[in-house]
Image: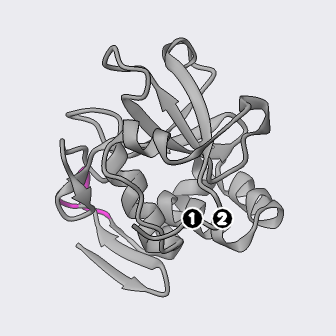
Amino acid sequence: FFFSSRRRHTRCLSDWSSDVCSSDLDIERFLTDRGLLDQVGQIRQQLSQKASDLVVNAMGFLGVPYRRGGNTAENGFDCSGFVRAMFEQTVGLILPRRAREQAETTQPIDPKDLQPGDLVFFNTMRQKFSHVGIYLGDHKFIHSPKPGERVRVDDMRQAYWERRFTGARRVPANSEQP
C-alpha cells in the first residue's frame, strides 16, 4: 500500500519481496547501496523540476510487481502503465495506454540527446515499440519488464536491451491533455 504526500511515498514491501517497510530514508539507503543516489542528485541539478520530479517519483516504485494491463502500484504495472502513471502523477500529463501509442504521440529524438525523463523504446515482442521505459541518465532506464519481474533499473548497454532498442522519444513540454 502507498501513502502519498507531496509526491513522496511510503510503502510496505511485505507483499512483494521482503518484510521491509520503506520510507524516504529506506529508499535513500536503497539508492545509495546501488550507487544510484549520486546519479539522482546529479540529475536533479541538471534537469527541469518536472523531469527531476518524474525520475525521483519513478524510483520510488522500484520493486512493484509487473502485471499485464496494470497501471497502479497496488495492482502492479506493465511497462506502458508504469510510464503513464508516472507522467500523470508527477507531470500531470495523461499519455496513451499502449507503448506504441506513447511512441506515436511523443517527439523522436536522437539517442545521443537523451535526457532524464525521456522515453526509451524496445522491440521485445516483434513489434518496433512493444516496450517502454523512462530514461534516468548514464544509459540507465527504469521500467516494468515482464511477468514475474518487478519495476527495476537496467542499463541500455546490456546486450539484451542494446539489440532491442528502437528509439528515444521526448514528451513535449507543452503537451495537451487528451
Of the 4 image quadrants, the one containing the C terminus is bottom left
Q: Is residue 96 visible?
A: yes
Residue contact between numbered discs 1 and 2, judged by CB atoms under 8 Å: yes
SS label for mark 1: loop
Q: Write down the quadrant of residue 167 in the picture.
A: top right
Colouring scheme, one of rainbow, by chain, secondary structure, one colour: one colour
101 vs 161: above or below: below
Q: What secondary structure characterizes most of the magenta part?
A: loop
Give the number of callouts: 2
- Cα separation between marks 1 and 2: 6 Å
55 vs 122: above or below: below
SS label for mark 2: loop
What residue is shown with label 2? 173
Q: Residue at x 51, y 66 (%)?
A: 57
Q: Is residue 140 magenta?
A: no
Q: Which residues are magenta?
A: 14-20
Q: Amino acid at mark 2?
A: Ala
Q: Amino acid at mark 1?
A: Ser
Percent x, y for residue 58? 48, 59
Of the 4 image quadrants, the one containing the N terminus is bottom left
Q: Residue at x 35, y 35 (%)?
A: 145
Q: Residue at x 47, y 63 (%)?
A: 87
Count neighbours of disc 1 (C-alpha within 10 A) and say few if under 14, some if 14 to 19, many if 20 or more. few
Percent x, y for residue 114? 72, 40
Classify residue 164 as left or right of residue 76: right
Percent x, y for residue 177? 45, 70
Classify residue 155 as left or right of residue 23: right
19 vs 149: above or below: below
What residue is shown with label 1? 175
Percent x, y for residue 33? 59, 50
